Amino acid sequence: MKSIIITAAICLLGFAGCGQQNSPKNKKINKTQPKNYKMDISKLTNNTVKEAFEAWQKGDSQSFLSYFTTDAKLFDDGSPRDFQKFVKDACGHERFTSIDTVENEGKDIYGNFHTESWGDFKTYFKFHFDADEKISRLDIGQAN
């Protein structure tokens, strides 16, 4: 009888241990939101930028590219890059996790950004328009 009680006590302690939750201080905190995270985009006042931004966030490169001229230019921290290659490689893998500031009549976005290869950092996207209101240039870079 004594061995049955000891065995039952050990089993109960084992089950109780399995049911314990990590305390918040021991939980790993994910600083980035999942791709389907819905952030507040009410700060985006330029409709074209807002729609392009939403396409970027969804990873919809075809829709994102539709807001740009066919010969759109990309500058990364001031250096020219291949725009089409950037969109192909980054759209769907990189995204804003928050919007901090919007300037220049809604054409410049500053916020936290997540990339699979470089992690999380502050960045900017600055959209430039041509006379037909298509985006002709995108400046991206690390923000201070």
Image (tube, rainbow, N blue to C red):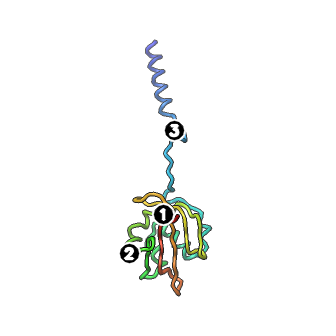
Pick whichever of labels 1 and 3 is earlier in the sequence.
3
Tag 3's secondary structure? loop
Q: Nearer the viewer, residue 75 or 13?
A: 75
Mark carried by residue 22: 3
Instruction: Calculate the distance from the C-alpha at mark 2 to the C-alpha at mark 3.
Output: 46 Å
* Residue 83 visible from this viewpoint: no
Label 1 and label 3: CA atoms lie apart by: 30 Å
The percent position of residue 132, horizontal first and vertical second, equals 52, 86
Residue at numbered disc 2:
82
The residue type indicated by label 1 comes to: Arg
Quarter of the view holding residue 41: bottom right
15 up-or-down from 78: above or below: above
Give the answer, above or below, for where 111 lies relative to 137: above
- Residue 91 horizontal side relative to residue 112, left or right: left
Q: Residue at x 55, y 67 (%)?
A: 110
Secondary element at image label 1: strand
Give the residue at the far top of this rendering.
1
